[in-house]
Image: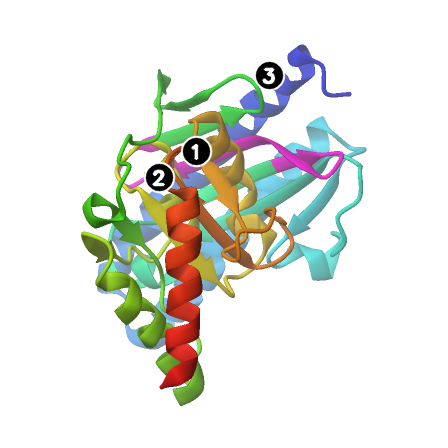
Amino acid sequence: MGGNDSLAEFLDTAVEAAKAAGEIIRKGFHLKKNVEHKGQVDLVTETDKACEDLIFNRLKQKFPDHKFIGEETSAEFGTAELTDDPTWMVDPLDGTTNFVHGYPFVCVSIGLSIAKVPTVGVVYNPIMNELFTGIRGQGAFLNGNPIKVSSQSELVTALLASEVGTKRDKVTVDATTNRLNSLLFKVRSLRMSGSCALNLCGVACGRLDLMYELGFGGPWDVAAGAVIIQEAGGHVFDPSGADFDVMARRVAATNGLLKDLFVSAIEEAESSSRQF
């Protein structure tokens, strides 16, 4: 398991599945403008489900012994626990709010972990036609061209991506905005694109220098992006500075130079968000 030949086969299969699912997303994305609100929710659910079924069926057919963790699927026939077995983690439609609004940051994210280590990653944005891929030890690519992280070495010139998350209770919103408030004094600017997977890929290809997100959906949002960032020369870690845990629903990423500065900035932001 996990020889270079099989890794290439895993990647090829994931790319084929992502592209096929991308077709479904593209159709729904362009169709959605004529759909009433109630119908929009159904369209998202249907698109999500159709993509997930397609991806899981293709992967299962090819690799019947592998395990699966997915948004809908863990409940159905997947697993919620990560073992050493080769395990696929799939987000069939990351950026559903963007999908509803016709904002083009939507993607399919397919990651494979082997012995609990994220090893193969594919993130495909079918609207902008960008395919990010990575295999552990073999580099990261955008549409087949090698990518690498930025060389910014100061926070003040760094571009940060984050998300506000889905919860809108006062405590969560205040903590989130206070944290961002603190960080905004230290970085050049902030972007919220609405897709965790694409934020990770943005750091990998040097469009972004820093990203962090707390409380996203699950490992399927970050498994693929984690491989791609590391292969592009960046760092992926827990926002506290601890090691990255694909199951933890907490992630931060930087280029090769900013990790320590970013961890201290997050720490300061945490303490200031508690003072308010």
Instruction: State the residue position of label 3.
Output: 8
- Identify the mark at residue 234; answer none if there is no mark: 1
Do the residues bearing badges 2 and 1 touch, measured as CB atoms within 8 Å? Answer: yes
Position of residue 74 measured from the top left corner of the image (x, y, whole percent): 70, 57
Do we see residue 165 in this rendering?
Answer: no
Figure check: 241 above or below 13: below
Position of residue 273 measured from the top left corner of the image (x, y, whole percent): 39, 77
232 horizontally vs 188: left or right: right
Q: Amino acid at mark 3?
A: Ala
Instruction: State the residue position of label 2.
Output: 203
Span highlighted in magenta in the image: 112-130
Look at the numbered disc 2 and give the secondary structure of its residue.
Answer: helix
Judged by depth in the image, the label closer to the viewer, 3 or 1, is 1
Q: Amino acid at mark 2?
A: Val
Judged by depth in the image, the label closer to the viewer, 2 or 3, is 2
Q: How far is disc 3 from disc 1 in space, using C-alphas?
A: 22 Å
Do the residues bearing badges 3 and 1 touch, measured as CB atoms within 8 Å? Answer: no
How many residues crowd mark 3 within 10 Å: few (<14), some (14–19), many (20+)?
Answer: some
Position of residue 53 measured from the top left corner of the image (x, y, whole percent): 60, 47
Q: How far is disc 2 from disc 3 in space, using C-alphas?
A: 24 Å
Q: Amino acid at mark 1?
A: Gly
Which residue is drawn at the image coordinates 70% and 45% (left, top)? 68
Look at the numbered disc 3 and give the secondary structure of its residue.
Answer: helix
How many residues crowd mark 2 within 10 Å: few (<14), some (14–19), many (20+)?
Answer: many
Do we see residue 62 in this rendering?
Answer: yes
How many residues crowd mark 1 within 10 Å: few (<14), some (14–19), many (20+)?
Answer: many
Determine if the magenta segment contains residue 117. yes
Look at the numbered disc 1 and give the secondary structure of its residue.
Answer: loop
Disc nearer the start of the sequence (2/3): 3
Using the image as rendered, state which of residue 243 and residue 265 is in the foreground. 265
